[in-house]
Image: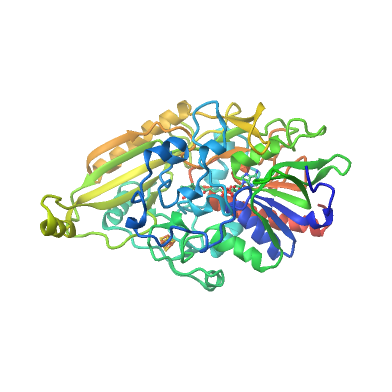
Amino acid sequence: MANINTGAQDRTFDAIVIGSGISGGWAAKEFTEKGLKTLVLERGRDVKHLKDYPTTNMYPWEFKHRGQIPEAIKEEAPVVSRCYAFKEDAMHFFVKDKEHPYEQDKPFDWIRGYQVGGKSLLWARQTQRWSDYDFEGPARDGFAVDWPIRYADIAPWYSYVEKFVGISGNKDGLDNLPDGEFLPAMEMTAVEKYFQGFVSKNYKDRNVIYGRCAHLSEPQPIHIEQGRVKCQKRNLCQRGCPFGGYFSSNSSTLPWAEKTGNLTLRPDAVVHSIIYDEQKGKATGVRVVDAKTKETTEYYARVIFVNAAAINSNLILLNSTSSRFPQGLGNDSGVLGKYFAFHNYRATIYADYDGFMDVTTEGRRPTSAYIPRFRNVKKQETDFLRGYAAGFDTGRRKWNSQDGVGTSLKDQLFNEEMGNWYVGSHMMGETIPKEISQLTLDKAKKDEWGMPVIHINLGYDDNDEKMIKDFHEQMTEMYTKAGFTNIRTGDSKQAPGLDIHEMGGARMGKDPKTSVLNKWNQMHDVKNVFVTDGACMTSTSTQNPSLTYMALTARAVDYAVGQMKRGDL
Ligand SMILES: Cc1cc2nc3c(=O)[nH]c(=O)nc-3n(C[C@H](O)[C@H](O)[C@H](O)COP(=O)(O)OP(=O)(O)OC[C@H]3O[C@@H](n4cnc5c(N)ncnc54)[C@H](O)[C@@H]3O)c2cc1C
Ligand code: SF4
């Protein structure tokens, strides 16, 4: 142990934020902009925008394995190597599985990026708002508990974060997928436009839209001020973007927070637990283990934001025990770690299209089309609860003959032949948070930093199987009617986790007996601790979740600072 009793003044801040990923970056920006001295604690190494993107400008032939992952590395990284983005150009932004053990009570692929910026460097940048149909879901369908907020509570905060992040999208006018503050959309392909027109003509409740994404299609002054410029559509985003064309904590919120002069960022700082003071009846700080030296230090603040990503935030809270909270911080309800859920990404469908042989795509585009949820939106209409959204991707097949040698081979390689169009969709299904789906701490096993190893007990249920069947049936019908041929449905049977949308465990709710957080993401039982990452989610709906974490974070900071000013925190 070191440092605990020395220089407490230097280790005291107005606010502490645990984690520097998408949600933690937002907490840092908001606190520092409002004038609070803020400490961001990040367990991973520092990654500075531009400077620490080693592969960003590399050509394919400069990679030792031409971008692919050798079998030996896959064997060493059995979990993270299953993620589609784990390639030679970005594998340095993923954890090494062996160094960070966890217990899979049921198979679970935990995809993590431990570094400044977290998974914001790696994400696919798909961003959709929730609507009231999503927030009202649990109350209407009778699963989980009622959300303590509705769309009207979060709508202004969606607008607030969207303007800063920069979201490319179309105003589609859908009540189940509210419009946002959009930069112009990029072009849709001929087949996407065809399917869009076909679906809107033939299905009154279904739509195909451009996939809204966090890319600067037309930067505004606020983005230029961040040092970011127009997205060049290179589609190499997971390397870190030299243009700041997509949103990440590294390109956007963290440098912004730094400019205020109020930010202290400590990389290599593993938060072990939150310190609770029984006399004061609140949290006073955090215990941190240095990732390299393993020294322990305490930091103090008036308010603490937990943004370590859903599973690690649960781990930290469950590990924060005291005689007042023997089962984990703020866990009077006993639900901490429970009602955990994810998105069901198992089902796919692919097909061909023989039309539009005179049209092709030019260049690249870092998004695809999107089919918003259409099942059980306004009323229960199937034998399963909730529904699914789907991606919709198209392209033209290309090939070149590789016969011959020398000049004739070269000529053939330069002369690509165009084939027909392919189309494909993958399901993004809501799963039901259940009490048995839970995270618990191992009583004996600890990791290198003295943190208990977490057990993840999460699986598919009958509802998920019925949803997969329905997705295959409905999409097959739509594809067939649209004239797509050679339709192939698939079920990857992948374990939960590869969706990388884990949520819950410290859910929001109206009743302190059945939830951990109130409508401001504030712990019912410990008023100066807030959780605003995926751990706070009462249910999962079908949308990609990160935009909602950002909006909830900005909203919660605004509330916390108001409370601090009034002397209530
Ligand atoms: C390949 C890929 C594609 C994705 N695509 C999308 C998408 O299209 N749309 C979407 O909405 N989402 C997408 N996601 C998910 C998205 O990245 C996450 O939802 C988002 O990053 C969560 O933000 P966060 O702040 O909760 O966590 P993170 O961004 O993961 O940040 C958490 C941070 O906390 C740190 N940390 C953890 N434990 C501790 C500790 N004990 N002490 C200190 N620090 C700690 C971590 O190192 C990390 O830096 C994708 C993710 C991946 C990997
Ligand atoms: S597609 Fe846009 S955001 Fe992605 S790497 Fe290229 S320029 Fe950057």
Q: Nearer the viewer, residue 539 or 33?
A: 33
Taking the image as drawn, is residue 71 in sight? yes
**Vertical position of residue 84 compared to residue 365: above or below:** above
Instruction: Determine whether, in the image, residue 190 is placed left or right of residue 272.
Output: left
Q: Nearer the viewer, residue 93 or 471?
A: 93
Counting every numbered tag in the picture gives 0
Scheme by which the image is coloured: rainbow
* Residue 80 drawn at (x, y percent): 47, 40
The quarter holding residue 222 reads bottom right
Give ligand 2's quarter of the image.
bottom left
Instruction: Determine whether, in the image, residue 421 is placed left or right of residue 452.
Output: left
* Residue 159 drawn at (x, y percent): 56, 61
Query: Which residue lies at the image location 17% right of the left edge and 53% below the top edge?
Result: 400
Instruction: Determine whether, in the image, residue 427 is placed left or right of residue 176.
Output: left
**Vertical position of residue 529 compared to residue 28: above or below:** above
* Residue 358 drawn at (x, y percent): 17, 59
**Vertical position of residue 453 compared to residue 409: above or below:** above
* Residue 213 drawn at (x, y percent): 45, 57
Q: Quadrant of the N terminus?
A: top right
Q: Name the residue furthest right.
A: 279
Taking the image as drawn, is residue 12 in sight? no
